Image: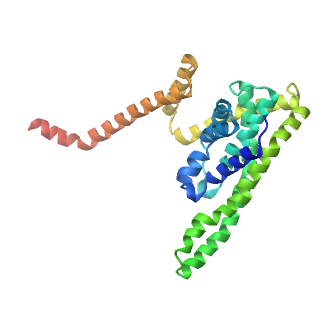
Amino acid sequence: MEISWIQAILLGLCACLSSMPGMGGSSIGNYTLGRPLVGGLVCGLILGDITTGILVGCAMQVVYIALVTPGGTVSADVRAVSYIGIPLAMAALSSYGLDAATSEGTALATSFGTMVGTLGTVLFYGTATINLVWQHIGWKAVEKRQYKKLYLVDMGLPWISHLICSFIPTVIMCKLGADVVEMIKTALPMDGLAMKTLFTVGSLLPCVGIAILLKQIVKKMTDFIPFLFGVVLAASMGINLVSATVIAGMFAIITYKLKLLLLTKNSGGADDDDEEEI
């Protein structure tokens, strides 16, 4: 798969918009456009292979499904995963002749995403560092009561940071990365030890994401029962991600209704008894 300059530029713009204030900041850009699940669809549209893009995005999303950024601490940059990792993974799959739906394809995709996500933290902190300059400009504007200047500080100047640390690196890595993938293919054949190790590690990465998610939501042993029930249901029925989401949503509603009913009964039990006696 060859990535043209126009496609690389579009990917770079998406990387910028993933966390720009003009796109709603964290509410819209980072938590939607910047996520691999959405980025896979966008990359598929840009590169002309929607199916592969979505499959690669889903595989990478599982790894980062429990990613949080406490206090601005970022262990992996999902913008880089979405708009550098996914295009390069798609190019690698095309070069090696692998299907994204296979276990080998998923392992290769997650490995590329993890490598790029870790390197992307440098770009993330680079953007944050440059943004400190605009913050100082904003504080001086407040001190001088030039409040209209804050629009420029919030909506205009951050583009410079993202052009330097998001747009340019994304364009260069996506455009030149396809050639690098071909070099990797020549140096690391499919039956070599390096690729077998890469597939093994890549197949374990989704387990890390699921384990982190379980660590956040499981408070007692009985919380494992819905999780295990879902795993057994998916394995026995062969349902896909959409079906599993619908079933999970139904159980979430049932659980919510039951808890709401218990809270209502505990808080209004006395009033109900009085009404019955009357």
Q: At x 71% / y 30%, what residue is drawn?
A: 106
Q: Is residue 114 above or below residue 71?
A: above
Q: How many circles with numbers are drawn on the protein?
A: 0
Q: Which of the 4 image quadrants contains residue 60? A: top right
Q: Is residue 39 shown above or below 233?
A: below
Q: Is residue 89 visible?
A: yes
Q: Where residue 104 appears, x then y in whole percent? A: 75, 26
| Residue located 56% across and 45% down the image | 32
Residue 38 or 271: which is nearer the viewer?
38
Name of the residue lying farthest toward the bottom:
144
The image position of residue 232, as x and y in percent, is 55, 21
For the C terminus, give its image quadrant: top left
| Residue 66 in picture, x, y percent from top left | 60, 42
Q: Is residue 8 above or below residue 226?
A: below
Is 225 left or right of 60, judged from the image as shown?
left
Q: Is residue 85 left or right of residue 139?
A: right
From this viewpoint, is residue 113 visible? no
